[in-house]
Structures are given as C-alpha cells and as structure tokens.
Image (cartoon, rainbow, N blue to C red):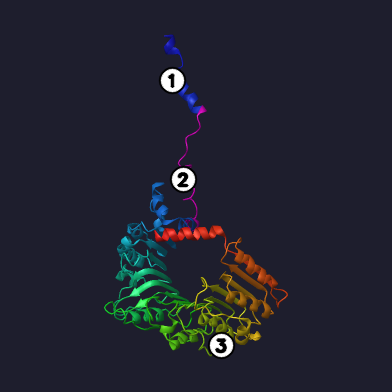
Amino acid sequence: MAVSGSSSPSSPKRRRLLAEEAPPPPSQEGTTDKLMSLPNEILDIILARVPFERLVRFGCLSRAWRRRWESVPELRVELPPRLSSARALWRCAAPVRSFRGRFSHLLGTTTSRWLRALARKRVQELTLQFENIPWLLLPKRDVVLGPAFFSCDSLVHLHLQNCRMPPSQSGFPGFPKLASLTLVDVALLFKGGGVQLQHLIAAAPDLVVLKLEDVVAQASADRFAVEEFVIRAPKLRNLSLTFFSLCEDNGCRIAQELPLLEEASISIDCLVGSFGPQDFLDIFRPIAAVNTLWFDAKATSCTVNPLEGITWRFENLRKASLRVTFCRLPSFMAIVSLLRCAPHIEDLDIETCDTKRSTNEVEIDEDFLNSEIQDDLISGLKCVSLSGAKYLSNQMCFMKFILSKAGSLQSFVVTFDYPERSRRYKKACKELAECQIASPQVIVRQNFTDDKIQQQMCQQRMMTLK
C-alpha cells in the first residue's frame, strides 16, 4: 500500500513536473527554412552561384528545396567530362543563360541530348569543349554536333573546340544575336562548308569578337580542296586568326575594312611563303585601324619578310607583340617593317624563339641596325620587353641598340632563359649594365628563369607524353 501511494514516474504529478522543467517543443514556425524565407530575388542569386551538380542534389534537404532550383532564372551550368545525363536540365522551367560542357571523346555523342534541351531553354552562352584525341589513336575532330545545334537561336556567345560542325538545313537564318564566336580545331568537312561559315559570321550584325583557330572548311572527299570564306563583320573589335598548320591555306579572307577593330592576333606559323605574299597582305590591310596587334613571325622556313610589302600605316597602333626568331633574317626584319609602318607605337613586346646557334644564323651588328632602323622609328617607344632571351649576339646587339637609341624609353624588361646562377645570365646582365643608355628615366629590369619553374614545365611535358 505504501508503494502504491508514492509518486512514480508515471503518476500525473510526476508528469506535470517533468513537463514544467523540460523546454517547450519547437513550434512549426521555428522549423521554417531560413533560406526559403528570403525574398525570391535574393534566393535566385544565391542558387545561381551554386555548381550545377550540387544544385540538383539540394532536393534532399527538404521538400521545399526539391524543385526550387528549376525556376532559377539566369542559370549557369558547367559540367565535368564525366557527367553526360541531360535529364536534370529538361526539368528546368526557367531559361538557361550559360552552359559550359567539357566532354570526353566517348561522351561526345551525348551532346545531342544537351543541345535539344538547351535550345528549348533559350541558352545564350554555349561552350562545348571536347578532349583532343591524338592523331595516332583516332581521327581528329571525330565528334559531330547534332542538328539541334542550329536551333539555339538565342545564342550571344558561342565557343566550340575539337569537333565537327554539321551542314545546316536550308534557310538557316544563323545566330542573329551572336556577339562572340570562338572556333578552335573545328572542321566543316562537307561541300559548302566555307559558305556556311561565311553566312554564320555575316548573319550576326553585332559580332564584336571573332576567334578562328585551326578552322578548316573542305569537302571530306577531297582534303586538298579548301573552300574560301570571307569575314564580313563591320562592328568587330577583337579578331584572332590562327591558320591550320597542316594546310597551306584554310580559305579565310577578310572582305572589308574593320574600322572599329581594337585588338588583332594573326598567326600563320611557318607557312607564310607557301601562303602567298599577296594573300597574306590582304589579311593585314583591313585591320589597319587596330590598336593592339599580336603577330607570330617566327617563320623558321620562310625566305621573305612577311611584312615587307606593307605600304600603308597603322596610325592607331600603340601596342604590338611579336614572336620572332633572331637567327632568321626574314623573321627579324618583321620587327623593322612593323616599326616603319606603325609611327605611333609605344609598347613593344617581343618573344624570342631561338634555341641555339645554327649554321643558317645571320649576324646582326650595329651598322646593320643603323642602316635599317632610323632614330625616328623608335623615338616614341616607351615600354620594351623581351622574353625568352639568350646570350646570343643578335639578341644582345638588338637590346643594346634599343637602349642606346630610344630617347623616350621608360621601361625595358628582359627575361633570360637561364637560371640566376648561370654564367651566361651573369655575362648578359653585365653587358647590358655597361652599355650606353639614351633615356635617363628608363628603368632596366633583368629577370631570369627560375629553376623551380623549369622543373614544373619539364614535369608537365613528361605527363603530357605519358
């Protein structure tokens, strides 16, 4: 009886005391997701910055998150090579602003599903990059884009790399909103490929950036029958042309002057001689209004100066970057020709490609430079940089000449391809320090190649070979 009268844990009095001491249970309002309580505009900004793979997995957090990402406007999607499913993108209700896919060669066929989905989502920025297959393993540009590619009519920025572009359907209007077009290792291997590429460029009236690197338009049956195509883009501001190293001529021409052009990059490697002097000059004439020019003039097999025939002036050119070979006179003379036709150039950046002394090296001395480069040609130079330099007579003579003649020079930077402890580096620095300097305000800086950087570059080359 005494036991029954005592206070047990199950008695009403005991339960009442425990209820008073225990904290109150969380209310339904306390469990509300703080992120979901944010305004939709702020939440969209947060979700748009989350990587796409993680964004799709957010549905496991709560029921409210399950499909929230599907309505995010201005969504940017970036996929690694291993991801190939397009089902998640189909569920997205809002337009997709940007899509960047890096696909392996084996997953290249799945891009058709992505392109169909992206065309429906009115994608504006499209980047498709495929892995580069070595020539010994598989034919290059083996991945062919599907016909859904031409349905992406809202494109503003397009970047394709290592693929083939298929023929478009009759009446294809192009991409009228396109402002930036980049094609790298892209082939149009069918009859009329050049005409299609020409139409693709001309159909974008507001195109301001055009980069064509190793682009080939030719029929697959005849690998030597390259089709010509012309560039018509009056609003172009940035132009980059790199010609296919295994073809003498990829058919690219510039049909009209580009008055708004600000930056241009031209690279024809060692094929200047076989490309044709007049064809080569026809590329430079329409870009006479350029402000910044990058030109690859190393031309190790060229027998003529690639810029010798230029009769006009680059009146707006202020900065030029050249890649030259000092041991080859035609390549070196490209510097002289550029200085002659660009009277207002202020910034000259030179990258040397000399490896070692060879039997065909041409000696350049001070008398030769005085006869070819008058003082007025370099009087406006303010900044000069030389990278990849070695302790070679031609390079040293040129550097001493610039320091002794350029009276307005403010900065002279040379980076030697030697470590700091090298004897050649120390000799080169000593000679430059002792040479006559015309400009009293010039700052001369001599850099060297770090041993650690060289080791990293060697390791990268070994990994690439493996």
Q: Position of residue 350 (x, y in %)?
A: 56, 74
The amino acid type of the residue labelled 3 equals Arg
Q: Residue at x 35, y 61 (%)?
A: 104
> In the image, which is nearer the foreground, mark 2 or mark 1?
2
Residue 414 appears anywhere in the view: yes
Q: Image quadrant for the N terminus?
A: top left
Upstream in sequence: badge 2 or badge 1: 1
The image quadrant that residue 172 belongs to is bottom left
* Camera sees residue 62: no
x, y (%) of residue 445?
65, 68
Instruction: Tell me the SS state at disc 3.
Output: loop
Q: Is residue 7 left or right of residue 445?
A: left
Q: Residue placed at 47% from the left, 43% from the top?
A: 29
**Circle 2/circle 3 CB separation < 8 Å:** no
Given residues 395 and 358, the one toward you in this image is: 358
Residue hosting label 1: 11
Distance CA(mark 1)–CA(mark 3): 103 Å
Q: Which residues are magenta?
A: 21-43
> Is residue 93 located in the magenta-colored stretch of the structure?
no
Mark 1 packing: few (<14 Cα in 10 Å), some, or many (20+)? few
Type of the residue with mark 1: Ser
- The disc placed on residue 313 is 3
Q: How far across and how far down the image is residue 208, in percent?
A: 48, 77
Instruction: Give the camera-side residue of 392 and 178.
Output: 392
For marks 1 and 3, the one nearer the N-term is 1
Residue type marked 2:
Thr
Specify the quadrant of the image occupied by residue 321. Answer: bottom right
The answer to whether the residue labelled 2 contacts the one labelled 1, judged by CB atoms less than 8 Å apart, is: no
Q: Residue under circle 2?
A: 32
